[in-house]
Amino acid sequence: MKLGFIGLGNLGTPIAENLVLNTKQLYVFNRTAAKAKDLVEKGAVLCKSIEELASLCDIVFSIVSDDAALKQITSGNEGIAANLKTRGIHVSISTILPATAKELSALHRQHNNHYLASPVMGRPEAARTGKLNFLVSGEQHAIETIKPLLQQAGAMGVWEFGNEPTAANAAKLCSNFLIISAIEAMAEGIQLAKKSGVDVTRWMNMLTQTLFNAPVYTNYGNILLKEAYQPPGFSLRLGLKDVNLVLEQASSVAAKMPFGKVLQRQLKDSMEKELAEYDWTAIALALK
Amino acid sequence: MKLGFIGLGNLGTPIAENLVLNTKQLYVFNRTAAKAKDLVEKGAVLCKSIEELASLCDIVFSIVSDDAALKQITSGNEGIAANLKTRGIHVSISTILPATAKELSALHRQHNNHYLASPVMGRPEAARTGKLNFLVSGEQHAIETIKPLLQQAGAMGVWEFGNEPTAANAAKLCSNFLIISAIEAMAEGIQLAKKSGVDVTRWMNMLTQTLFNAPVYTNYGNILLKEAYQPPGFSLRLGLKDVNLVLEQASSVAAKMPFGKVLQRQLKDSMEKELAEYDWTAIALALK
């Protein structure tokens, strides 16, 4: 099976590196070709276009920044769907709307190949240490085919959400919502504790040894206590994009999300404070 | 040392039971004397008044429902402060405002005895299984004296927050804020996931095995998934009381709490839905 990879961003790059190291072969494409340099040195083959890459591969991974970018690389005569082999699989890692997954899944079906929703949880350091968690949904046979490849891409866990390509994307959006909610809650709590004369390191230490003994509180709590908002593991700009998707999805299914609305407002305020390329924990600065 | 205990509510009762079982002696008082019946059968001595109890004891534990009740039992000629022995210690477990702790601490000092802030984290089942966490702050010698007693009262952990009696209370309020924030975030996430066709049990299972692998998500997540809002481990009415205190404290130190305001609104909405005596996880029903 020949593998392709499109999208060498902050998270895409270490995932592609895992694949090239573990499979010894990978076709890659990136809009900015220079970003593929290191990968090519490690053995990847750089393609000139998505069309070329898709026509060479049985399985194409993609991780791009938003719904529009994913539609753009997937659709049209030069896109993945039209050029991927019959029964080929497009493993779509991007965090997108369920509706986009549905639309692109139908498009792939027209071309007799598969779209597999495979959004991922984990920051770049998790990719480098093989601690990613992939949420997958779509055609069962396609899931079975790509599971060992996701391990090679850096998965600690692969979590199946059934046959609907929309489900993994919805679950991913809800997961990101829980993460940024925990961050905002910690930011508000740390600020209140600090202003009330509490030793906040001691306080967070107590919480993360008891009721809140989980990586989301330990890791993000540490960043918040140190105010170490750069370099970003996940940018505030992308965080706002995800919260916008959460609220769009909530609106489409008539779900109330009062916390979601606060998060959107705080992230927008942070963007206005020129924090777009800071880590999304910098949402804490909107409280200042 | 003679020990006293005031306040046999939902959480006070199992703590007092631990003390009477482990120390073989305990003077108790409760506004509703009938609630002391089981404790007396286990060996506790029922007092007729707070004045009587305080004058008999070296150390008095109190856990009452709010700031007003605590002030009432502590102040005045018939209160704890005026009747407790010289160098006696009032171990105040209630969740209250830091300002109240400061005021009562000064009152105790006038009577040459000690006020020790000792709010507790844990629901009644945690008390029964010795898994409580006490946050303590106040005079260091008093802390050292009561630490072994807190173990006997059901502590898994005793967390020290320095000499200011206000600090433990502020830390406790911030902790409760983080808990109810996690509950609200899960409630919103679960609703969105469910309405989007996600198998929510599978989704929460993934989270609590990865980034959110902590009791606050496992335990409260389970209640939310089962919608098991009765009987209450901690009532929604008391949850609103605590969030009101959080916002009062935030206002007094000029801390912004947009999540806090949402929580207050959602809890008030839930109260209007007659959910006051449901578990505070029933905040989820305000989304319906």
Image: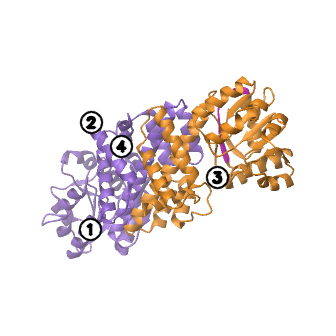
Chain colours: A purple, B orange
**Residue type, label 2:** Glu
Front residue of this view, candidates B148 and B49? B49
**Residue B214 seen anywhere in this rendered image of the structure:** no
Quadrant for the N terminus of chain A, please: bottom left
Q: Is residue A230 above or below residue A80?
A: above
Where does the image place residue A177, in percent across and percent down from the top left? Answer: 39, 53
Which residue is found at the position 62% from the left and 40% from the top? B67
Q: Chain of mark 1?
A: A
Residue where numbered disc 2 is placed: A274
- Asked whether the beta carbons under mark 1 and mark 4 sit within 8 Å of each other, the answer is no
Query: Residue at label 3?
Result: B123
Q: What separation in Å lies between label 3 and label 4 (alpha carbons)?
A: 33 Å
User: Bounds of the magenta span?
Assistant: B132-141
Horizontal and vertical percent for residue B194? 41, 67
Q: Chain of mark 2?
A: A
Discs 3/4, front: 3
Q: Quadrant of residue A230?
A: top left
Disc 3 and disc 4 on one polypeptide chain: no
